[in-house]
Structures are given as C-alpha cells and as structure tokens.
C-alpha cells in the first residue's frame, strides 16, 4: 500500500505529537492528583520531573543499570521525595490560606532547580541510551524510542487507573478527595492517603523524566520549568482534578504543539500552549471534562 | 469564579518563576586567571560564558586567554607591568553580559575587555563599552553587527558573511548539492545572520532552498520540524546553531525521524564542542562545519600553542574558541605595548593597527575592525573532528 506524501507527513507528525503528549500527560497526572486531593497546585512538580530525569541519568551512568531498572529506581526515589516534600513543606500549611502553600511550592521549585545546578552544574548532560531501531511502516518512520515512551506511558496510566479504582487505597483517595472531613470521620487515615497521592504523582513525574531523557537524550537542571508549565496547562485543559482529563489534556497539547510546528510556526509552539490555557480559562474554566464527570482523585 | 482567579494567580506566580530562573542560574564562583593584584598591574576584563547553555565555549576561551596572559607575564608583562585578568561570567545570557560590562568598567576599572563568545551576548555588552570608550575585543562573535556598534569594538575571528559563503560553496562544489534546507535558531543573532548569508549565496549559485524551519535555543523537541525538513527532500541541511541544540537535532534526525545518511548536515563554528558528540553520538558522523582553526594545521606557531595548552590544561587539545581567544589576548597585549599607554583613545588606535601572526591565522583588521583570514572546513568522522580543507578569503 502506498500512501501519498501528505498522508505520510501527517501520520509522522501524529506519532511525534502522541509521543510528546504522553509525557505531558504523565506529568499532568501528578498535578491533577494533588490538586484533586488537597486543592494545591504543586509547582514543584515540574522539578520532581527534572529530578526524575537526573536520578535516571545517575542510575545509568554511575550504577550501570539498564533502562527499566533505572526507570523503577527513579520512580521509587521520586515517590519518597514526594512524600518528604509533602510532610515537610505542605502539611504544616494544610489549614492556612491556599496562597501560602502555593508560595511554598514556588519556593521548593526554585530550591530544587538551584540545588541541582549547585550539585551537578548547569551544563546539559547527555542521557546514555542504546541505539534505537527504526521501523518503516508504509513510509512512516517509527522509532523504538517512540514506541518505548508511548508503551511505558500507557502501562503506567493503566496501573494508575487500577490503583485508583480497584484498591482500598484508591478508594480512600477518592473519599478524601470528595470530602476530607467526612473521610476522616469514617476512619480513613487522611495523612497517609495524602502522602500516598504525592508518592504516586511524584513517581509518575519521575518516570516521565526518565522517558524524556531517553527520548531526547539530554538532561539539564532547568528542564522542569517548561515541562511543568506545559503539564499544568494540560491538567487545566482536561479539567484539573480529573484523571482522564489530564491524559486527554496532555495528548491534546502534544498534538497542538506538533501541529503548529508542522505548519511552519515552530517558534510559536510555546505561545500556543499558553494561548490554549487562556482560552480554556475564559470559555470553560472547568476544563474539557469538567462537567461530564464528578469523579475526582 | 474563585477557582478561575486562583488559577490566574497561580499562572502569574509561575511566570515570575520562569523569569527568576533566567537570572539565577548558577552561583558558581569563577576563577580569576591573573596574578595577585598589586598596584602595578594592567587590568583586562573578560566577559565569558562560564556557565549556561554554551559554557563549553566560555571555558575554552578562558583557557586560551589565561594561557596567553601567563606567557606574556612570564616574559615580563607589557610596559613593565603584569597583566591582571578579571573574569565575569555572563551565564550565556544577554542581561548578564551587559551587567558584567558595567561592573568591569565601573568597579574594576579595566583598560580593555575581552568577550563575549556568542554574538547576542557581545551585542548586549558592546554598547556599554562603546559609551565608556573602553576597547572591547570579541574572540569569537562572528555576526557583522558586533563591530558595527562602534569604533571601540573589535574581534579576532572572521565574520559570518565569509563563513556562510564558505559553507554554501562547499555544499555546491564539494557535495554537488542543488537543494538545501536551513534550520535557524530564532533566538540568536548569529544564527539569523548566517541563515541570510547562506540563503543568498546558495540561491545566487543556482541552488534552491526547499525548506526553512526555526527553533529557539533551549528547545529539546525537534522531531516535528525535522519531519517537515525530511519531507521537503533536501540534499543538504544547513544548521547555523550552537552545539547544545545541534547535538539533539542530529540525534533526533537520524534516530527518531529516520533521515537517510545521504542527507548531509552542514554547520558553522558554533558546532565546535565535544558536547556535540556526547549528545549526538554516532549521528554526528559524516557532517561538516566551518571553523577558525584546526589543531591538525601544519604550522610552528600552532604546534607551540597546542603543546603549551596541553601542558597547562591536563592534555586537553585546544579548540577554535581557545585559539581565537588566545589570539585576542595577544592582540590586546601587542596594542598596549605599541601604544605605550593604556589611555583609551591611543589604545583604540593601536588595536586598529595591530598586525600579528596568530594561531587562527594572520590577523590584520580591515576598516570595519574585522580580521580578514582563512576558514577551515572540518569533517566529523568516527566521533572526532578531522581537518578537511582550508578556504582562503577572496
């Protein structure tokens, strides 16, 4: 079967967009979970993503792990970091004004960035990886890296869905998200549930960091800011606090950015992401899925 | 409504985060290359990219300058005084370059300034030096606009019109290319300038530009624009950018988008860093770029330079950045010596008249304060730079 040049280009860009979008979706899930449960936008989340990439980098270069063990190590460290971050920085402020927590998040973000610069330097680092395999499907090039990023993201999202919907902890998360005081009265350990949410969200961000590292081949201490912001846009776009919304928002954003580049306006890709945020805030602040579902985590 | 407001506040706060991230990149202290300050020194300032995106360039340049001043000081300095090198880190950004120029002139009272590397950064610092009438020599800013800032601004490297023409000629004559694509870093005066020059030279020689795409430095995702380039079907792809982006582009072109190895990537002196190999790996093989100098060149002065550089910096081979910075340091020393003073106006005239045999070619400035000298084309092969040919100015 022969496809026309236009179709091939379209499919190729579609693959590029989905790969990028699945990373945004993974990071956005962490934003949205934390927002769903304690109504905090955790701006340090983008930097947890960056640290995930850095941990993955060291797991591979210093301890000689291969990709999947490095991914798991990075997810575990990020999960622990998420719990510690919540306990030290956010828990004492849980009952104060929301802006106080938000400021703390911004402070944490700066701390993570500059601490990383201090420890490993501001130079971009090459992320070690094996040579990819390229498949040519009807003229469309598919790289094994793209398959890896997409498959890993899908598996993680399915796992998350399972945890939230089928486990006891997931039920507790949904209950706390719905009404924290009532959940506490019903005997749910709210503190542990919130910590668990941070752990899961941070682990997903860490995984996204390692995936980005292996896909683009570079890690640097300031990479978290832009990805964090884009993921925030993705979360708001899908409806902040709604899990499927974050996935949808991430994919939509990845495709939108790729689409803008494809039609020749590559320098506007960041602008487009934020224009989407402004438009969604004006016309549908609850996000795409904001009204259809009441389920929150 | 409350939620909307909250999200807007949140967005504003993040915007401030991005801004502050731009200015607070690195607190790392910077080594001062000169001797101990005494009353009897001549202070020369340096504005270099010691940290940030193109830190590899700044560090090589620093090494070149430090080596030159050490050699000069060991021979008794200039005018019987030792040279003290006062280095400021511009963190690879424009704002910090301007701040560094202010500081060097007002607080340190330097006689002249060396730097910066990137044209954008030099263009930020140069007007300050020009207003204060302090001579500034950029070792490696190739954008023509740099010396157009004023009569106190000089450089020790060739300029983009020459470099762009060299690569265009190379594409047509050596590679037999008739179609080309250009990938421009829209955040860099250097890249935009070279794009114009290449486009003009290539089309004037009968070639056709089939695709022009843009990115901004700091991007990591090039898959999408590379897909557009690939589908336009060029024979060569010209990327006048810096190694940090180019390394990623070369890798993604081959490994994510599936460029065939028949398409040749061409670049300019911004590619000259070992980091390019780290980022691109094997994908860098078979590409060509123009540069100021090659360590393989067969001349006595180059060999001496390489030997003393290796001795001082743990066996490192000097790159072109180190070479042009070394030459810039010798230019300023020669000018102070011939002027017999560090008085700004006399020093300016002396720099304009300076003539010396540098490691990056013979330096003689034209009326626009730009040196007229040869370029080399370097081929990347087997993960290393190999000398390919020398192109003389016409």
Image (tube, grey):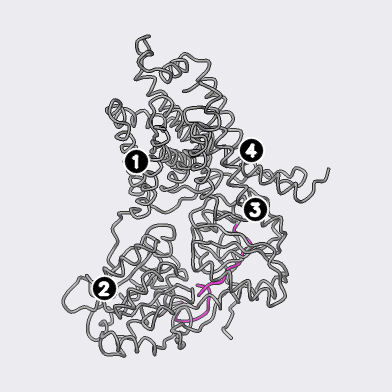
Q: Which residue is mark 3?
A: A263
Indicate left or right for B288 with B6 as reference.
Answer: right
Q: Nearer the viewer, mark 3 or mark 1?
A: 3
Which residue occupies the extreme left position in the image? B39
* Magenta residues (range): B284-302
The crowding category of the residue bearing disc 4, from other C-alpha atoms within 10 Å (few below 14, some 14 to 19, many at least 20), is few
Q: Residue at x 34, y 32 (%)?
A: A85
Viewer-side label of 2, 4: 2
For discs 3 and 2, the disc positioned in front in the rendered view: 3
On screen, B371 above or below B184?
below
Q: Are marks 3 and 4 in contact (CB under 8 Å)?
A: no
Pick whichever, A285 or A90, lies toward us: A285
Q: Which residue is mark 2?
A: B105
Which x, y percent locates residue B17? 36, 47
Q: Chain of mark 3?
A: A
- Residue drawn at x 38%, y 23% is A194
- State the CA–CA distance, disc 1 to disc 2: 36 Å
Rendered location of residue B65, percent (x, y): 35, 73
Q: Are marks 3 and 2 on the same chain?
A: no
The kind of secondary structure element at disc 3 is loop
Which residue is tagged 1?
A106
Q: Determine the image quadrant of residue A80.
A: top left
Could you tell me how far apart the alpha carbons at marks 2 and 4 are, in whole angstroms?
Answer: 55 Å
Give the label on residue A55, or none: none
- Which type of secondary structure does the marked residue at label 4 adopt? helix
In magenta stretch: residue A72: no
């Amino acid at each position: 079967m022969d496809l026309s040049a236009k179709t091939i280009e379209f499919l190729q860009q579609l693959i590029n967009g989905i790969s990028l979008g699945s990373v945004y979706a993974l990071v956005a899930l962490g934003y949205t979970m934390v927002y769903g449960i304690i109504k905090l936008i955790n701006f340090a989340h983008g930097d947890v993503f960056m640290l995930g990439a850095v941990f993955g980098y060291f797991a591979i270069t210093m301890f000689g792990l291969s990709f999947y063990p490095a991914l798991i190590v990075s997810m575990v460290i990020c999960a622990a970091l998420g719990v510690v971050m919540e306990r030290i920085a956010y828990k004492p402020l849980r009952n104060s004004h929301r802006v106080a927590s938000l400021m703390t998040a911004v402070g944490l973000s700066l701390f993570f960035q500059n601490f990383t610069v201090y420890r490993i330097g501001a130079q971009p680092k090459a992320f070690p990886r094996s040579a990819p395999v390229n498949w040519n499907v009807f003229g469309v090039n598919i790289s094994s890296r793209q398959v890896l990023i997409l498959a890993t993201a899908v598996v993680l999202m399915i796992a998350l869905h399972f945890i939230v919907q089928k486990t006891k902890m997931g039920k507790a998360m949904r209950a706390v998200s719905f009404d924290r005081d009532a959940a506490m009265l019903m005997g749910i350990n709210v503190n542990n549930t919130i910590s668990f949410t941070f752990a899961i969200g941070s682990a997903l961000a860490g995984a996204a960091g390692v995936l980005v590292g292996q896909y683009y081949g570079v890690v640097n201490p300031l990479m978290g800011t832009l990805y964090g912001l884009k993921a925030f846009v993705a979360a708001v776009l899908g409806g902040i606090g709604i899990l499927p919304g974050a996935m949808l928002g991430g994919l939509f954003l990845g495709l939108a950015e790729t689409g803008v580049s494809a039609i020749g306006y590559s320098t506007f890709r960041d602008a487009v992401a934020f224009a989407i945020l402004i438009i969604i805030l004006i016309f549908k602040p609850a996000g795409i899925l904001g009204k259809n579902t009441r389920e929150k985590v | 409504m409350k939620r909307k407001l909250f999200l807007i506040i949140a967005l504003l706060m993040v915007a401030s985060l991005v801004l502050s991230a731009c200015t607070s990149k690195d607190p790392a202290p910077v080594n001062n290359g000169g001797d101990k300050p005494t009353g009897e020194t001549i202070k020369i300032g340096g504005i270099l990219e010691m940290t940030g995106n193109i830190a590899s360039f700044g560090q090589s340049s620093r090494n070149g300058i430090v080596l030159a001043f050490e050699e000069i000081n060991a021979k008794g300095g200039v005018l019987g005084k030792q040279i003290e090198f006062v280095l400021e880190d511009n963190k690879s950004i424009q704002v910090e370059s301007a701040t560094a120029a202010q500081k060097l002139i007002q607080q340190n009272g330097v006689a002249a300034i060396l730097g910066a590397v990137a044209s954008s950064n030099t263009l930020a610092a140069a007007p300050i030096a020009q207003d204060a009438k302090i001579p500034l020599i950029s070792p490696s800013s190739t954008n023509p606009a740099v010396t157009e800032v004023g009569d106190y601004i000089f450089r020790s490297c060739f300029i983009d019109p020459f470099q762009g023409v060299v690569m265009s000629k190379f594409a047509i004559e050596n590679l037999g290319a008739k179609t080309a694509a250009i990938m421009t870093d829209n955040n860099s005066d250097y890249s935009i300038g070279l794009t114009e020059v290449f486009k003009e030279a290539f089309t004037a020689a009968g070639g056709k530009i089939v695709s022009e795409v843009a990115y901004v430095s700091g991007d990591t995702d090039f898959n999408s624009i590379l897909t557009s380039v690939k589908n336009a079907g060029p024979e060569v792809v010209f990327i006048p950018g810096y190694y940090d982006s180019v390394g990623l582009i070369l890798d993604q072109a081959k490994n994510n988008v599936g460029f065939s190895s028949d398409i040749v990537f061409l670049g300019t002196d911004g590619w000259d860093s070992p980091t390019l190999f780290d980022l691109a790996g094997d994908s860098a093989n078979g590409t060509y770029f123009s540069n100021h100098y090659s360590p393989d060149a067969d001349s006595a002065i180059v060999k001496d330079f390489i030997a003393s550089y290796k001795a001082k910096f743990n066996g490192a081979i000097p790159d072109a950045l180190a070479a042009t910075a070394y030459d810039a340091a010798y230019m300023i020393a020669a000018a102070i010596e011939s002027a017999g003073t560090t008085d700004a106006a006399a020093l300016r005239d002396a720099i304009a008249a300076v003539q010396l045999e540098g490691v990056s070619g013979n330096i003689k400035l034209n009326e626009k304060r730009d040196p007229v000298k040869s370029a080399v084309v370097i081929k990347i092969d087997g993960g290393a730079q190999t000398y390919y040919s020398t192109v003389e100015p016409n």
